Image (spheres, rainbow, N blue to C red):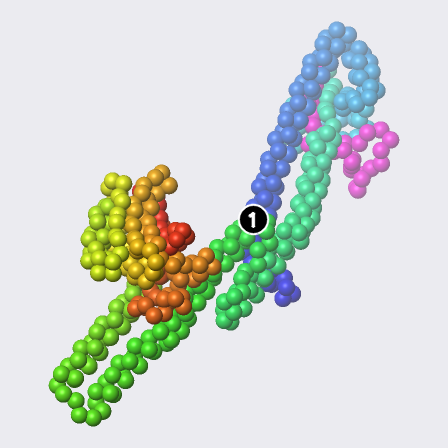
Amino acid sequence: MAALRAIWNTTAARLSALYLILFVICATVLVVYMTSLSTSMLTAQTRDTINEEVMGLAQAYDRGGLPFLVRVIEQRARQPGANLYLIANPDGRVLTGNVQSLQPGVLTTDGWTEQPFSYRRFGEALGEADQPAGHAAVAIVFRLPNRMIVLVGRDLGEPEQFSRVVRRSLVVAFGMMGFGALLIWFFVGRRALLRIDSLSEASRRIMGGDLTGRLPVAGSGDEFDRLSENLNTMLARIASLNEGLKQVSDNIAHDLKTPLTRLRNRAESVLTGKRSTRDYREALEANIAESDQLIRTFNAILMISRLEAGNSAEPTTQVDLAETVQDVVELYEPVAEERKVRLTSAVAGPAVIPANRELIGQALSNIVDNAIKYSADVEGRAAEVSVNLEQSAAGVVLSVRDNGPGVPAGERERVTERFVRLEQSRNMPGSGLGLSLAKAVMTFHGGRLELADAEPGLVVRMVFPPREAAA
């Protein structure tokens, strides 16, 4: 009983029951309508046949009188499938024909019988109270000039048989429909309920804290699979965000511990012993510089988190990347000259896209700063950094190429994560957030960040989608 109640509580079962009831009502109305229409048509056809028969008998009476009419009726009454024929005296006593007895009152009124009447053929038994039983018919009654009564009728067995066939077909159809509904429920509905139960069980495990769990996918490509795939994508996104949050927390605890420790040690060393005003001032200035760097780090973390979460409210306008490249190159030319790095740019005409100018400039500045910093650290060759802007049907590519030590192929994906710094860059200033911010900026703009081998060195590409796709 509980299982049936659980099945009835499902929307699929209620819809199936509703459709079944609707189908039964429509089928019943249709069958009743068709039956009544067919019966009416058969009755009308019967009346036409009787009228033709009456006309033929009238012609026979005109030709030979009553004796000839009796012979014609006796001849036609013996034929297979004959109509009903009866000649009675004015008192209603049957003289000839193929009808032995009639329902009382049929011969008292001339014309068509108002209702079907019962009758008994020769050799048939009587029903209750000696009444004719077993057959129903319609007939026309008329009188001859000598007051003799003539009845010509037609048995209603064909319309009744047709009605019985229709009713039997309706019962069989309902039975087959019920059996088919059971089969559909067993092979389709039951399977759907089992899949819903498996989805519910997986959902309970996920709600219990197991974010590695996923909803089952049967591989049939139906709506359940599409729902599971979408929810699994959402769960993977949530798990990725949670993992990113965990990494941020771990990285903050690990990488920000050192500058905070330096701040404390510097303050403690200044407070130890007698110090001059100059010493206090230098210590405060160093702490302020260290605090500014921490603030910049936290701002970068917040910006990356907002961009990756997709809820940044940064406005976008039509930005010419060529002007952005020119501004960044001009900004870093003094830095490159100081580090003895040759900084060049190559721009293939204006490239206007919908973007946020500040975000693009910050991301490009981080990449150029890294390229200058690491290419200047290599000895034995002249350091070079080039910024190139190219356009094609596939999109706009803004690339920064250097001839520094490069990044191993297995580490290129990892260096775009927050606070990740390779061993050879541990002695370099920085927080390990430059490429992470650039990747988040490209994700915000619907593009991608690519790292490749420059042979020697590294090339970082900011690939923007075509203008139509970006819009």
User: In the displayed structure, would residue 420 be above or below residue 191?
Assistant: below
Q: Nearer the viewer, residue 164 or 325?
A: 325
Residue 26 shown left or right of residue 342 in the figure: right
Three-letter amino acid code at the position of disc 1? Gly
Q: Position of residue 91 (x, y in %)?
A: 75, 25
Using the rendered view, name the quadrant where residue 278 is placed.
bottom left
Crowding at mark 1 (Cα within 10 Å: few <14, some 14-19, many 20+): few
Q: Secondary structure at mark 1?
A: loop
- Can you see residue 324? no
Using the rendered view, name the quadrant where residue 59 is placed.
top right
What's drawn in magenta, residue-wise? 116-145
Quadrant showing the N terminus: bottom right
Q: Nearer the viewer, residue 444 or 135?
A: 444
Using the rendered view, name the quadrant where residue 137 is placed.
top right
Residue 426 shown left or right of residue 166 in the figure: left
Residue depicted at 19% across the width and 81% down the height: 283
Residue 298 shown left or right of residue 246 in the figure: left
Residue depicted at 54% across the width and 68% down the height: 205
Q: Residue furthest front?
A: 380
Q: Position of residue 262 (x, y in %)?
A: 28, 80
Q: Position of residue 315 (x, y in %)?
A: 24, 54
Tally of numbered tags: 1
Quadrant showing the C terminus: top left
The residue under label 1 is 221
Residue depicted at 50% across the width and 67% down the height: 211
User: In the displayed structure, would residue 353 be above or below residue 120?
Assistant: below
Q: Position of residue 302 (x, y in %)?
A: 30, 66
Residue 328 shown left or right of residue 37 in the figure: left
Q: Magenta segment: does it hold 222?
A: no
Residue depicted at 30% across the width and 53% down the height: 385
User: In the displayed structure, would residue 396 be above or below residue 156?
Assistant: below
Q: Magenta segment: does it hold 124?
A: yes
